[in-house]
Image: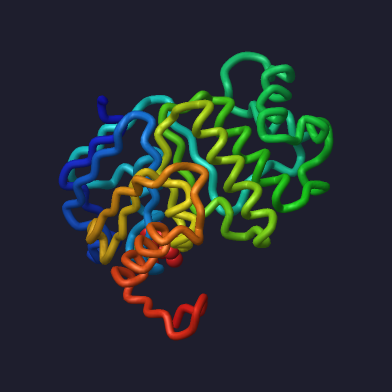
Amino acid sequence: MANSVEIRGLSRAFDGNTVLHALDLDIREGEFVALLGHSGCGKSTLLRILAGLDDEIGGEVTVPARRSAAFQSPRLLPWLKVWRNVVLGLPGRPDRALAEKALDEVGIAERATVWPKTLSGGQAQRVSLARALVREPELLLLDEPFGALDALTRGKVQALVAELWRLHGCAILLVTHDVEEALLLADRVLVMDEGRIAHELSVDLPRPRDLTAPEFVTLRARLLNWLGVTRTLEGTPS
Ligand SMILES: Nc1ncnc2c1ncn2[C@@H]1O[C@H](COP(=O)(O)OP(=O)(O)OP(=O)(O)O)[C@@H](O)[C@H]1O
């Protein structure tokens, strides 16, 4: 299968401080890749470059023209009703039917005509996903989109993303701090360290994935080990 993303020798420095070091990465069409790594290792910097928000780079980056992003904060404009937020920036007149179709897909069609401030955190994140998907991206960039959600809502939105990915077939790059989330969702998990891809793991487990399966537990232990996290008590990272 062709590559959706090709990165060769990517570097980025801020004020003389190098954050990305000659990074190479390929993401295949339709592949779901999760990116883990300690705070400050350069994950968001990489995502912003792929989103086209930062071009002060060295090296080569090839990405599809149709790409969209969703971030930890849903970034909805408070003075526009939900449906208008979804189609904001698309060419032509705001298409309400298109917005409603996307909102229906993320399970909140009934919230199309409300103001963003009346949404719960989980609903706002669904709107953010609808806004990303309505652009029919070949590449979807997700920067900790579930980070601010409570555990129950987080699980539901994770399941939604898995389903949307199955239906749309776009490549996804998901930045997360959550090892289980990465293993539940991704085909491949990358561990970044100081601006380089330090480790990678293929996740050949059937979906939906079972957190308690021995294979899952083994992969989780390997990732935690790479991240330098040891487990002292069952379920308690130290
Ligand atoms: N615009 C900027 N100006 C200066 N330094 C920056 C800028 N953006 C990022 N950095 C620095 O680059 C490094 C990597 O930041 P980045 O946000 O990519 O890390 P991250 O891995 O996404 O971290 P986190 O998990 O905490 O979100 C950090 O040291 C950060 O301070």
- Quadrant in which ligand 1 is drawn: bottom left
Q: Residue at x 67, y 15 (%)?
A: 93
Left or right of residue 199: residue 154: right
In the rendered image, residue 213, in percent from the top left (x then y), is placed at 46, 58
- The residue lying at 71 percent from left, 53 percent from top is 121
Which of the pair 207/160 is nearer the observer? 207
Q: Quadrant of residue 28?
A: top left
Q: Is residue 51 left or right of residue 167?
A: left
Q: Nearer the viewer, residue 206 or 81?
A: 206
Which residue lies most toward the top here? 92
Q: Residue furthest front?
A: 214
Q: Position of residue 163 (x, y in %)?
A: 56, 35
Residue occupying image coordinates x 61% and y 33%: 131
Image quadrant for the N terminus?
Answer: top left
In the image, what residue occupies the spot 37% across and 43% down? 187
**Is residue 233 positioned above or below 108 on the image?**
below
* Number of numbered labels in the structure image: 0
Q: How is the image coloured?
A: rainbow
Where is 128 relative to 89, above or below? below
- Report which quarter residue 14 is drawn in: bottom left
- Does any portion of residue 53 appear in the rendered image? no
User: Can the viewer see residue 213 in this picture?
Assistant: yes
Say which quadrant the C terminus sits in. Answer: bottom left
Q: Is residue 13 left or right of residue 104?
A: left
Across and down, in percent, residue 195 comes to 26, 60
Q: Nearer the viewer, residue 231 or 164?
A: 231
Image spot of residue 71 (x, y percent): 54, 49
